[in-house]
Amino acid sequence: MFVSPFSAPGLWLRGNLHGHTTESDGRFTPAQYAAAYRARGYDFAAVTDHGKITDMGAFADRDFAWVSGVELDGPEPAPFGHHVVALGLDGLPPRGSRAGLQATVDAIRARGGLAIVAHPYETGLTSAQLLAADGYLGIEVWNTLSVVGWGKGVATVQWDEMLQAGRLVAGLATDDTHQREGRADDLGRGWVVVRATERTPGAILRALAAGCFYASTGPRIHDFRVERGADGVCTASARCSPCRYVHFLCDRGLGRTAAAQDGGEIGEAQWRLHPSATYVRLQCVDAVGGTAWSHPVAL
């Protein structure tokens, strides 16, 4: 059952769950990677080098937690294959167990990890292909490198098609930073904010698994709740940092956008949901295009 992070006890912790170092194809050493996210005020991060779990224990302390991670890939679905971020693994699954997307997810779960489908828009994964596999936490609805490198880093269409089909997977924002060609524009632009009981890898992983987080490239979500009235109809309400638009997204065109009358900014909104809507998610957009995405809620 989904537990709202806004009513759960704990700490709000900001982190990046996808990035690479010189241990695979990134240009930052592990030490430089650690320094970059600390300098940006993050509370935790994961290094997800390709095919290798990079030990970041030397850079952890009471103020910063490191979640173990790795990026795994496979040859199917065609033509570009799949990439999956695995978090919290105790070791690498055998290469032969990752012949397809479902097999990769199963191999990650068998080793106690969480699976996130990476940059599905960039790799050409359709919602039908994503729906053909299950058991993963969610998909990257924002991948910074895919945005700045190929213009294909926003996968909200695939996400909503999956939600409308009844699969309430999470949407996550990550950097996938590689610092290619001396650029730093793929770093510090997409993150998750989790509600964890403490600043430890275990607590962060448990919060992610429970859906106690939201994703963002800028705005902050202060509250998002859905309440069912005596007539059986649900009302969604939200509070956020100043934003230009507050979207309540549901099946097809059943949602609603709230905006300030004068074209300014708003910090709260609510909407009485259509009785036939099966899910709702919050999407807040600020004046410079930064976006925050809530976990979806089944109605």
Image (cartoon, rainbow, N blue to C red):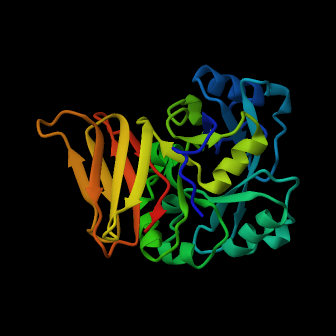
Residue lying farthest to the front in this orientation: 230
Q: In this view, does 224 lie to the left or right of 194?
A: left
Side of 136 relative to 226 (left or right): right
Q: Is residue 173 visible?
A: no
Whether residue 274 is situated above or below residue 8 in the rendered picture: below
Percent x, y of residue 4: 53, 51
Q: In which quarter of the image is residue 79?
A: bottom right
Extreme residue toward the top, this view: 39
Whether residue 212 is visible, yes or no, is yes
**Residue at horizontal 60 percent and vertical 57 percent from the top:** 118
**Residue found at the very far left of the displayed protein:** 262
The structure residue drawn at horizontal position 27% and vertical position 56%, both measured from the top left corner, is 271
Q: Residue 168: image x %, image y %?
A: 52, 67
- Residue 232 as seen in the image, left or right of residue 295: left
Residue drawn 82% across the image and 59% down it? 112
Q: Position of residue 246 (x, y in %)?
A: 30, 46
Q: To which quarter of the image does residue 287 belong?
A: top left
171 or 231: which is nearer to us? Answer: 231
Q: Residue at x 79, y 53 (%)?
A: 51
Position above or below: 275 against 259: below
Tally the numbered discs: 0
Q: Observer-nearest residue: 268 or 38?
A: 268
Query: On the rendered image, what quadrant is the C terminus found in?
Result: bottom left
Is 179 placed left or right of 238 in the picture? right
238 is higher (above) or lower (below) than 232: above
Q: Quadrant of residue 178?
A: top right
